[in-house]
Image (spheres, rainbow, N blue to C red):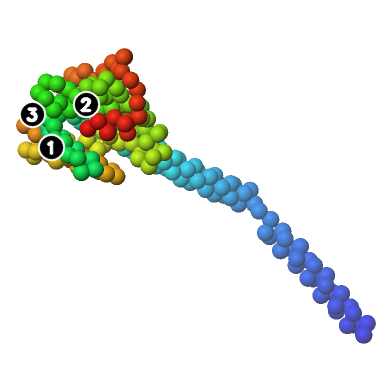
Amino acid sequence: MKQQLTIIALLTVIMVAAGCAHKKQITPTPQTLAREEADRQLEAERLRIADSIAAAQAARLWAIEQQRIADSIAAAEEAKRLQIQTLNIPRMTVIVDMQGKQMSTPASMKWQRGVGVTVSLQPFIGMEMFRFELDREGVTVIDKMNRQYGSISYEQLAQMGTHSSMERIDEWIDSHIIEHLDEPVITLQASRANVSITAQLYTSSIQKDLTLNMRATNTTGYKQVAIEQLLQSF
């Protein structure tokens, strides 16, 4: 038994000594430390280069996007510059059917983009009886024979279920009139409740991009009444 303990003790001493020897063998040398530091610096440089490339790509994409936006704005401005800005329509016919009562009259129309529209009804040559004026605020109807007028704003029209604005009117003229100027006659129709209106525009007389007088009619001395009352005068 004593001999066995002696052997175990010797084996333990040998194993401990071997462990110490192993630790001494794996202790990094200066050359190993230098190589590891070089590897770390190389990896750091690789990461820096990757970050630089990513930043350069982001900057390039940003520049491309900025140029795309600039090109889009320039194209929109050019398209706007080429848009027809005014129309003078001296020859048109308006037919109004109100509760079975029909009236047909010569008329004229002026339009300036972003400013307004005026429609003049002239049952007798050179004599204006009714005038419709649409501007950025709303609609005004003028009865020159009876020296009275009525106005309604777009907000009031919206409360009645009709949503409109100068921008919408311009878009409507673009799509319903300007896009059809190559046709000899443009027919426009509108109806609401018991009133229907048909307008025929003779394109051979239409003048584009003229300087127009779009000032509102001076209603001094005119009586202001409800538009519904004015329409009954037709």
Q: Quadrant of residue 166?
A: top left
Kindly tell me whether residue 214 is visible in this rendering: yes
Q: Which residue is mark 3?
A: 205
Mark 2 secondary-structure assignment: strand
Distance from Cα at disc 2 to Cα at disc 3:
22 Å
Quadrant for the C terminus, please: top left
The image shows residue 200, relative to residue 134, as above or below, that is: below
- Residue 175 is situated, as x and y percent measured from the top left of the image, at 21, 40
Q: Hey, what amino acid is under mark 1?
A: Gln
**Residue at figure coordinates x 17%, y 39% from the top left:** 102
Secondary element at image label 3: helix
Which of the two discs, 2 and 3, labels the residue nearer the N terminus?
2
Q: Which residue is mark 2?
A: 130
Q: Residues within 10 Å of mark 2 (few under 14, many from 20)?
A: many
What residue is at 11 percent from the left and 25 percent from the top? 124
Q: Give me the residue at 81% from left, 75% from top.
A: 11
What's the residue type where badge 3 is placed?
A: Ser
- Residue type at mark 2: give it: Phe
Task: Tell which tag, 2 or 3, sits nearer the viewer.
Answer: 2
